Amino acid sequence: MGGGLVCEDSGVARLKFIDVWPQTGFFDRPWGSAPVDAVARTARRVCEAHSVGLRTLGLTAPRASYRLLAQSAGDVDSLRVELIDDLDDHNIGILHVPADAHRWLPQPRAAAVLDAIHHTTMLLGERLGWDVDGLRQVSDQVAASGAQFYWEGPWKTSPGRASRARLRALWADDGYGRISVQVAGPAGSLFSPPIDSFSTPEGLQRTAATLAWQPEGAMWILPSILPFGIPDRPGATIRPDQLLDHDPLTDQPGPEGDFLAPTTVTAAWQDASPYRLDQVSVSTGSDARGTPPQVEQTIDQVNAGLSALLREWLEAAGVRELEWFYDYHESAKTQLRIYDKRPLISIFQQRAKADLTDPTTCASIVLDDLQRALDRLATKLGKKPAPQLHG
């Protein structure tokens, strides 16, 4: 997300998106600590609504997107943006999140996130010569809408051509879309009950592509599809007798609270002192039932020395933020993905839980998995050999 077209012969891009990271995560699990989880989820609708207006301004920037990394910061009492003055123009900043952000009502939290994004654009605009009046208008429009974000897909005509249907979505404060199929026909517009969907417009585009007419006027759809075309919910059939005569997306109550930030939001460029990696660790998402305790013990042992082992190596490669997730559960398939968006590196690993049920081998499997990730990262960074976790 956030990619844009490079302007011909200009060496710059059109700014398309400003988002808060993590941009997505598991529906039923936190995306980070409690305050980060709340801010990141609320930020989905705010970022999408803001970026719609942002794209109308035709702003040029070193890159087509700007990303704010949400981090817990218990010593602050409001959202604080720290923009990194990066010579490589990675377009990245830190969003410091106070410890009580998850206790704010949804609308005050959304207003604070919008303030943080607006301050970010204003600082960047001063440096890059953007239209600051246009930036203010975009922010004001998002605030006036309560940071609501709607999405509509293309129409699909029924086989008999008497009706057509399309996917519509509204973002909820939990970071995910609520979708409804709109059917327009001889009886007017009818709507399916709302269904949970993915957390990005790209995910909705994947879902919209699955919308298909079935016999006797029914429709079928895959409500939520992860990147790489992986569905994370079963397909749903929508029968004509399930359709409603009212729009369930606009009829449901909006997020709680007034759209007013609970505290002052600040933003500034980072101090000139060199940025250093903080704690480096592997986060786990697991179904621990039936898994030997050696698995978590092994990861804890690795984490105990990981910062000292990797910090200098990563910093020398220009890495300032490392996200490393190791996930094991019943439905997981063993895989490894690494995204190099320096200064951010994201590592996502999965291991089938069935591979970790033998106490005599589970520790070595986990260590081998983690070392394999480091070895592949070394190749990406051009920093061979990778530090060794064992042996």
Image: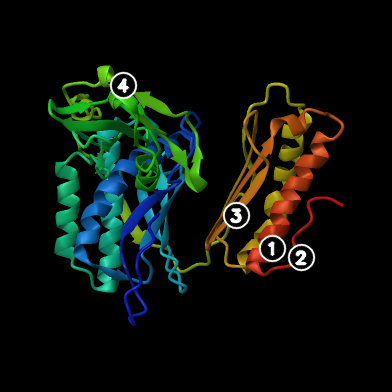
- In the figure, 236 relative to 44: above or below? above
Closest to the observer, 115 or 42: 42
User: Could you tell which of marks 4 and 3 lies nearer the N-terminus?
Assistant: 4
Q: Where is residue 67 in the image (x, y as percent from the top left)?
A: 40, 56
Closest to the observer, 114 or 330: 330
Q: Select label 4 or label 3 by which is in front.
A: 4
The amino acid type, in three-letter code, at marker 4 is Arg
User: Could you tell which of marks 2 and 4 lies nearer the N-terminus?
Assistant: 4
Q: Which mark is residue 338?
A: 3
The amino acid type, in three-letter code, at marker 2 is Pro
Q: In the rendered image, which quarter is residue 93 located in?
A: bottom left
Q: What element carries label 3?
A: strand
Dot 4 corresponds to which residue?
239
Dot 2 corresponds to which residue?
385
Q: Select label 1 or label 3 by which is in front.
A: 3
- In the figure, 270 relative to 112: above or below? below
Q: How crowded is mark 1: few (under 14 residues within 10 Å), some or many (20 or more)?
A: some
Classify residue 274 as left or right of residue 141: right
Labelled pair 2, 4 in contact (Cβ < 8 Å)? no
Q: In the rendered image, which quarter is residue 64 located in?
A: bottom left
User: Could you tell which of marks 1 and 3 lies nearer the N-terminus?
Assistant: 3
Q: Residue 378 carries which label?
A: 1
Q: Select label 1 or label 4 by which is in front.
A: 4
Q: Select label 3 or label 2 by which is in front.
A: 3
**Residue visible at 28% across and 44% down in the picture:** 46
The amino acid type, in three-letter code, at marker 3 is Ile
